[in-house]
Amino acid sequence: EAGVTQFPSHSVIEKGQTVTLRCDPISGHDNLYWYRRVMGKEIKFLLHFVKESKQDESGMPNNRFLAERTGGTYSTLKVQPAELEDSGVYFCASSPGQAEETQYFGPGTRLLVL
Amino acid sequence: ILNVEQSPQSLHVQEGDSTNFTCSFPSSNFYALHWYRWETAKSPEALFVMTLNGDEKKKGRISATLNTKEGYSYLYIKGSQPEDSATYLCASLSGTYKYIFGTGTRLKVLA
């Protein structure tokens, strides 16, 4: 069974540009989560989808971040326009059902904004 | 406490030593505690999901205990091996259904 995949693995962009990150969860997993880790800090929750609906987006830093999960399959996270402080590793995770179940993480996208 | 705190931040042990580290989390509205093992440039790998006070789980040489009343969990590694070198993360799930991660304990096992 394929795990959670993320694309791209790395992205280097200039301040003001737009970047779109993609996450493909494990097939059949209704729950999809986005997290971000800024260097040296803890992994922080961004948002949680249940199927195509946003269950909780309270961790999204500001309105430059837009997440979608059309059709309840893969998800995208767009940053527009990117700022220097957006640099970090963006992780996606999925789980099958209940919120307390094991989450399976993707390898992350390393974003560097110059 | 309101955050998830892990100690120590980093740890060096000799091969064969046993070691343990701590995760402290908010005890109110507790649902679950997750432990992950994370090697740089890889995905965090789930080790344990713990929900009940007094839970004790084991996976090979690694085990974990949970005290939900006082809000802490211990992770133990028996007979550490170089391949155990990684960052060990814990994450607490509370009534808001939002995971709060600690900053991790970086373990280096010296051969």
Image (spheres, rainbow, N blue to C red):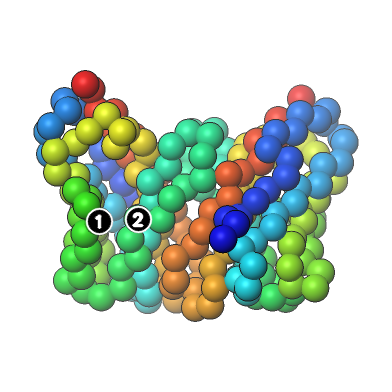
Q: Which residue is mark 2?
A: B47
How crowded pointer 1 is (Cα within 10 Å; few <14, some 14-19, many 20+) is rated as few
Task: Kindly report the distance in space between the C-alpha atoms of the residues bearing marks 1 and 2.
Answer: 8 Å
How many callouts does the rendering have?
A: 2
Report the amino acid beneath label 1: Lys
Element under label 1? Answer: strand
Residue nearer the viewer, B19 or A5: A5
Could you tell me which chain the residue with mark 1 belongs to? B
Q: Is residue B9 above or below residue B35?
A: above
Q: Quadrant of residue A69?
A: bottom right
**Residue drawn where x is 73% and y is 68% of the image:** A73
Residue A59, x across and y down, in percent: 62, 59
**Residue drawn where x is 21% and y is 21% of the image:** B111
Could you tell me which chain the residue with mark 2 belongs to? B
Numbered tag placed on residue B59 in the rendering: 1
Residue nearer the viewer, A40 or A96: A96
